[in-house]
Image (cartoon, coloured by chain):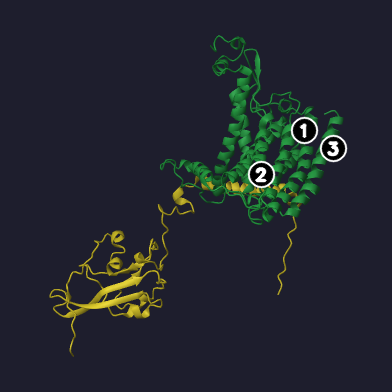
Chain colours: A yellow, B green
């Protein structure tokens, strides 16, 4: 199916070419003046290191492992995210821990290791959806870059501290409760 | 010893003569040398500053920001002017590559062939009112008026500019280059005719071709300037100047969307920089010509005998305005197709300038 292109009849003024050129020049000059008088903060260009783009709702950036107020990790090492991950970038090792105050002496599960290979991650957010405890989620930050491959292997503490500064939280590098030595549970 | 020299006895401008005698030069030679230095370095400086104007101006026109990251001494961005220094340093230290199959002699010569005519075309243009000091006339142009060449000189030198482009294109031994060079030289040659005919009608109405005569004939009243008398000639001349200086919309020498970079595809480092500077010097000379021919040169509107510095400032303002218009138009209009360019040159510009010439000849014959 063809499209009928309407030929625009040019007036004699338009056919002189000089007048349309002047109209075009007035447009570009308008842009010039407007851009010149706009303060830097209101221009379209985001001057990156100083200014950062406010990412839209639902943007999937770097992961964070959430924690309780006492610093205990929310993750219960259920492996749901690891199973859900289409890129297979999450690898978890579970451990048990026990505390009289928090777990009333019962033994509970938490990750001893929680590694995400950021080079493999496709930021699909499936881990966030799979998580029954809302312990992992993807935040809006997008500055995931490093000079070597090893720096892109995020461990448990890296992921728990991802937004420590931005949220005004303390950086932690230790679980508040000690882990129980690994043993076989006889049923 | 300079004080005792008989040369000082000549009546002249005391501080100038003092400087001249300190340098063991006659005042005339000193004046000449200082004019050459001021004009050529001034044009050179303006040309390099205009690369900044081009980049920042185009950025503003396109709602961008342009270069603002380079820092002078790690501190001052100076609105992006530091980029000039950064670019200069970069160009000097880049590897100076000459293609293996290039004609090496011509390849080296071409940037100078492009640069020198662009610069020396400025020589006859008066950039301020002539003044008398100590019984001696001082003319603010490198070549004094009455040199017999007048405005024919920049026209002839402008014709020379083709060689720079063509030699650069041919010596690179590159298909893109030769395409760009051939197109540009064809365009420049065909537009030169229309341009020259437009200028000839100014010579006719002025009754002389010396720039000082052209300026004096226009007077200080803006409605007596040639732009009012010959608007058609101005349009033709200004359009042809775009083809002359190889600037968009007639950017056929370079044509980066079609033929990589045209005549300077193979050029790098300082040779490329020199070609770019040649373009901007050419632009400066062209805008000075437009200001002289159509906008009264150094004449200050409504002031009969302006102070010398005011006249220089007025000339600079006019010249820089037209240099800005060159930039402005470049970022407004897209490039013409080559056949459209030739069509415009031969079938529109040439007849228009001929009509302009005939019309003014008729007017002269009617006694106007």
x and y percent of residue B216 in the render? 72, 25
Q: In which quarter of the image is residue A7?
A: bottom right
x and y percent of residue A115 in the render? 31, 72
Quadrant position of the N terminus of chain A in the picture: bottom right
Using the image, name the chain to which the residue with label 2 belongs: B
Q: How many marks?
A: 3
The answer to the question of whether label 2 and label 3 lie on touching residues, with beta carbons closer than 8 A, is: no
Q: Residues within 10 Å of mark 1 (few under 14, many from 20)?
A: many
* Res B325 seen here: no
Q: How crowded is mark 3: few (under 14 residues within 10 Å), some or many (20 or more)?
A: few
Judge from the rendering whether residue B78 lies leftward or rightward of residue B178; answer left or right.
left
Quadrant position of the C terminus of chain A in the picture: bottom left
N-term-proximal mark, 2 vs 3:
2
Measuring 84% from the left and 33% from the top, which residue is drawn there?
B363
Q: Residues within 10 Å of mark 2 (few under 14, many from 20)?
A: few
**Residue B202 numbered mark, or none:** 1
Instruction: Give the residue number, with chain letter if any, for mark 3.
Output: B358
The answer to the question of whether label 1 and label 3 lie on touching residues, with beta carbons closer than 8 A, is: no
**Residue B105 numbered mark, or none:** 2
Q: What is the distance, in whole Å, between disc 1 and disc 3 at their CAs?
A: 12 Å
Q: Which of pointers 2 and 3 indicates the residue nearer the eye?
A: 2
């Amino acid at each position: 199916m063809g499209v009928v292109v309407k030929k625009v009849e040019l007036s004699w003024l338009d056919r002189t070419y000089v007048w349309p050129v002047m109209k075009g020049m007035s447009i570009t000059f308008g842009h010039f003046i407007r851009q010149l008088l706009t303060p830097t903060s209101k221009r379209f260009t985001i001057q990156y290191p100083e200014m950062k783009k406010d990412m839209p709702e639902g943007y999937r950036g770097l992961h964070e492992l959430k924690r309780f107020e006492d610093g205990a990790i929310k993750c219960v090492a259920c492996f749901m995210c690891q199973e859900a991950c289409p890129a297979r970038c999450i690898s978890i090792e579970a451990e048990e821990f026990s505390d009289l105050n928090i777990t009333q002496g019962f033994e509970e599960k938490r990750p001893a290791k929680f590694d995400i290979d950021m080079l493999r991650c496709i930021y699909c957010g499936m881990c966030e959806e799979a998580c029954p405890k809302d312990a992992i989620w993807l935040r809006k930050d997008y500055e995931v870059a490093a000079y070597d491959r090893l720096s892109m292997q995020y461990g448990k503490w890296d992921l728990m501290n991802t937004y420590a500064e931005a949220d005004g939280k303390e950086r932690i590098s230790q679980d508040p409760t000690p882990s129980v030595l690994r043993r076989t549970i006889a049923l | 010893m300079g004080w005792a020299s008989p040369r000082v006895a000549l009546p002249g401008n005391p501080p100038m003569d003092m400087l001249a005698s300190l340098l063991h030069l006659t005042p005339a030679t000193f004046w000449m040398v200082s004019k050459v230095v001021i004009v050529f370095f001034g044009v050179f400086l303006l040309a390099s500053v205009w690369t900044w104007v081009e980049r920042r101006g185009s950025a503003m026109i396109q709602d961008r920001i342009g270069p603002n990251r380079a820092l002078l001494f790690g501190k001052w961005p100076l609105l992006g002017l530091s980029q000039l220094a950064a670019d200069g340093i970069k160009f000097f230290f880049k590897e100076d590559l000459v293609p293996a199959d290039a004609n090496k002699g011509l390849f080296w010569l071409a940037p100078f062939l492009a640069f020198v005519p662009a610069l020396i075309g400025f020589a006859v243009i008066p950039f301020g009112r002539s003044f008398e000091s100590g019984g001696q006339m001082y003319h603010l142009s490198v070549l004094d008026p009455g040199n017999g060449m007048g405005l024919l000189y920049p026209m002839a030198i402008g014709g020379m500019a083709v060689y720079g482009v063509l030699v650069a294109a041919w010596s690179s031994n590159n298909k893109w280059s030769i395409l760009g060079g051939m197109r540009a030289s064809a365009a420049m040659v065909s537009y030169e005719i229309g341009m020259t005919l437009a200028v000839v009608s100014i010579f006719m109405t002025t009754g002389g071709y010396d720039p000082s005569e052209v300026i004096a004939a226009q007077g200080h009243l803006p409605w007596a300037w040639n732009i009012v008398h010959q608007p058609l000639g101005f349009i033709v001349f200004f359009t042809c100047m775009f083809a002359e200086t190889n600037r968009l919309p007639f950017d056929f020498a370079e044509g980066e969307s079609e033929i990589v970079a045209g005549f300077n595809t193979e050029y790098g480092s300082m040779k490329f920089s020199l070609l770019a500077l040649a373009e901007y010097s050419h632009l400066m000379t062209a805008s000075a010509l437009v200001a002289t021919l159509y906008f009264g040169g150094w004449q200050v509107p409504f002031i009969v005998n302006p102070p010398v510095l005011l006249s220089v400032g007025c000339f600079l303002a006019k010249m820089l305005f037209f240099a800005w218009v060159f930039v402005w138009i470049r970022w407004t209009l897209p490039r013409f197709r080559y056949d459209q360019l030739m069509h415009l040159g031969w079938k529109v510009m040439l007849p228009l300038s001929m009509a302009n010439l005939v019309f003014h000849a008729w007017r002269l014959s009617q006694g106007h």
